[in-house]
Image (spheres, rainbow, N blue to C red):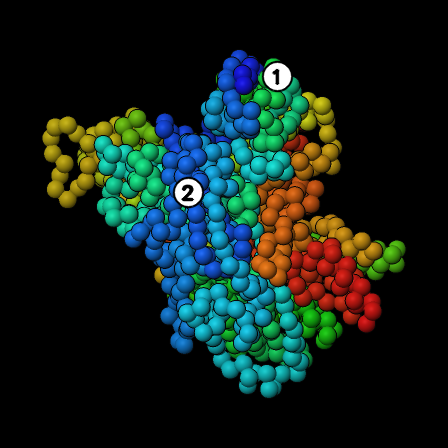
Amino acid sequence: MSVETNDGAPAPPFTGTPAGSKATPYVNSRVQRNEDARLLTGRARFVDDVHLPGMLHVAFVRSDYAHGRLLSVDAAAARERAGVVAVYTSEDLGAYSKPAPLLVPPPPIAGLVFHACTHLPLATGKVRHVGEPIAMIVAESRYIAEDAVRDVVVDIEPLDAVVDLEAALGPEAPRVHEHLASNAAAHVVQRKGDYEAARSRADVVITRRFLYDRGASAAIENRAVVAQWDTQAEELTIWDTTQAPIPIRNGLATMLGLPESQVRVVAPFVGGGFGPKIMMFYPEELLVPWAAMQLGRPVKWTEDRQENFYATTQERGQVHEAEMALTKEGLILGVSDTFLFDTGAYDPYGLTIPINTQCTLLGPYDIPNYHTEFTAVFTNKTIVTPVRGAGRQHGVFVSERLLDIAARQMGIDRVEIRKRNLLGPDRFPHNHEIMFQDSAPLVYDSGNYLPTLEQAAEIIGYEQFVRDEQPRLRAEGKHVGVGIACYVEGTGIGPYEGARVTVEPSGRVRVATGVGTQGQGHYTVFAQIVADVLAVEVTNVQVITGDTREFQWGTGTFASRGAVVAGSACHAAALAVREKALALAARLLEVEPAALDIEGGRVFVRGAADRGFTLGDLAGKANPLRGAVKPGTKPGLEATEYFGPDRGSTANGVHAILVEVDPETAMVEIKRYVVVHDCGTIINPMLVEGQIHGGVAHGIGNAFYEQLIYDEQGQLLNASFMDYLLPTATDVPPIETAHRETPSPYNVMGLKGVGEAGCIPTGAVFAQAVEDALGDPRFEIREIPISPNTLFNLITEARRV
Amino acid sequence: MLVRLTVNGAAYERDVEPRLLLSDFLRQDLGLTGTHVGCEHGVCGACTILFDDEPVRSCIMLAVQADGHDLRTVEGLSSDGTALNPLQAAFREMHALQCGFCTPGFLMTLTAFLRDHPHPTGLEIRDALSANLCRCTGYQHIVEAVTRVCRD
């Protein structure tokens, strides 16, 4: 493992352990996970495992049409069915039927146009995508509820559906939201420098059109909500598969007219998030708690897989018209990119995705002039919100493909053209002069890009492959290719997270934080951070996340921010507890705090190990039954701290791939996949590798297998795992990873996020390698996914030219 | 209909609707929530259990089909339900799980596979794993966990 600072000089790695401590640090080591035993033995609680006495079950009547007028809903027969307790249509909701809140208001960009059109809990007047909920059935069992779905007679007058992004903006297009003048949901222009002037002095201008299509997040756990209204305690408890329990609590309390203290949201173990589990608020999240209060009984809804394909948010539909202006030496003078972004039927998540696209296109390169403009488009398809990567892969795809095409046209090596354009290590912090999704200017905090690129090229044997291997294999009739692509990823954005660290009299340490957890390993990485600071065993630190009763300030797990933001808060809170323990021990032992050591769960006088206390003893003494807690001090060995960065930290990396293509069948075999990445200080290399592997697998799926196919009437044609193919163990190759660590200056530990990195450049590197393998100058890949069918058609077309 | 069966060595007798899915029966009637349901059409494999020692998808079977049979779920893998057996321990050691939702299905598929193939090749491992879907791990650490448990 190499550790580098911006100027290339080695920096001491962050050890997690304050100076003067002797314990072996847990941070930066392959610590096994604290949460695994429960998950491996089937004892971990997921939302669908919550089973309460008297619990009712929900099924939804959903629209079969993508677009239509909702003329009537007749639920009389359903209400009469034995075992049905209630049926609700939009009318039955009364004042509770309000448009969902806009989750992320657009950032302050001059000239920005944005039309907020959020969904209602149940469709009213019109249906705007297949699967939009129309009525809610509550029954004694899910089986009865689903029987009753078929009893409901829904009369819909079908309207032409808005499906194609470009046709959607035509003058004749039907309108998804009729009060708007067109299907444009937003229009945003961001500029840096003067692209037109740069273009006028360019030697080469590459102009291309690029497509990226929709995929599913496909967490193996579907969504679920359980709600219980306790009339005696006057408390509403909601178990929700959410990535953001605290905002869910706050929003539901407001909407249900309850004080926040009377609403508790628990996100227990969540079976994968990948973004869509933070779409606030899903209709089901609004309706299940409301129904539990109406009926005075616990209510559960668990999504089935088919519903997941229609009702859980999706992402990735974009169409780009882009160009890159370069000098004859291959230096980028500027980039212009104008694109359409499919936001689906409603836009509750604002403009996070397309703004990510705008920002991520710049990558690790010095691009002095940039014009980026997008139109967000309403369509009659499932709502779009971030899915792992969240628009970043589109930006990377556009810039990396333009560089590849420029390199080929100018006869410059692909690695060489990248090297010539990388930002040097002396260019940080680097202000890109455009606005990022967190409403702060896009500023790269730190980075050292050249060694990352060189290391990836070296591991995959780029030079040797291009020089010797590829010609030799081509001579044997094999179609082999190499791809190499760079990315920079904005991670770890604000606003803030908090943590409370408590030493119990038993000596056990409890850490509570507000972020939800969906498999990232928070129970372990936060424990590692705290264990180092307090010099205790990592298994002695119990982490609690995702329960608003335990911690009620924070936002959630998204944007690769959990470890960065909540991890920094855990570190700060643990340091405060450490100071408290040292001060108390110093007072009791009548020595200066500086004379004390903390190790093995004990505080003691340096050089006299028997003079001291265990942390548990100190916790007891800090919470006495008699005597005084001094003015200005607080009882207990406990502290709560918050961390809020001004802006996100930027991780980066390079992916390299070797593929072999069979031009007759268009099947692609991945021979090697290399990831060199830099996410600052690494808390747990094993978990970072896991994040990378999963991201790459997701990226391979997006690049090759996964595509949500809508017909011209907005019907999703492949809404099952039989038809929508997720990569399996035989599709994902072994992934070779190497870590680099350029610490972020924006937090004490130097952390950057890693959750999404694996899937960001995958499409770009895949396209480049397949193109290289076919080695036909008439053949270019400008779209993702590139399924065997699509690839076959492209090959056939190119041969015809 | 009356169903009599054994699950993890314990005998059960329950009166169930003929249409009740085996996965729902295990999770709701018997409270064995370690068996997870991911797709309800037999593809993802999260609901895999052992049915007379053979791996099956409990989401596409009916509870009544289990009458007179011997079932094993993830709760029955280790001796006391909390200690980890060698396969479970290898999963922890090699970080072969992230969110853990698909994990019980992988463990049950592998329990049968490793019984029949105690010394599999890497390709055989990947082929066996391709029966189950995981969205978190990219499968690599799962392959390494299986390799590890076969080596020990």
Name the image quarter holding residue A65: bottom right
Instruction: Say left or right for A539 vs A201.
Output: left
Name the image quarter holding residue B108: top right
Residue A682 image offset from top left, x and y in percent: 49, 47
Task: Write the residue at 53% across / 57% down.
Answer: A66
Instruction: Say left or right for A729 vs A497.
Output: right
Q: Is residue A19 above or below residue A541?
A: below
Q: Residues within 10 Å of mark 1 (few under 14, many from 20)?
A: some
Q: Residue A76's mark?
A: 2
Residue type at numbered disc 1: His
- Is residue A543 something one can see in this rendering? no
Q: CA distance from mark 2 to mark 1?
A: 43 Å
Q: Say which of A713 and A738 sits in front.
A: A713
Q: Is residue A40 above or below residue A370?
A: above
Task: Write the residue at 74% across / 37% down.
Answer: B123
Q: Residue B69's mark?
A: 1
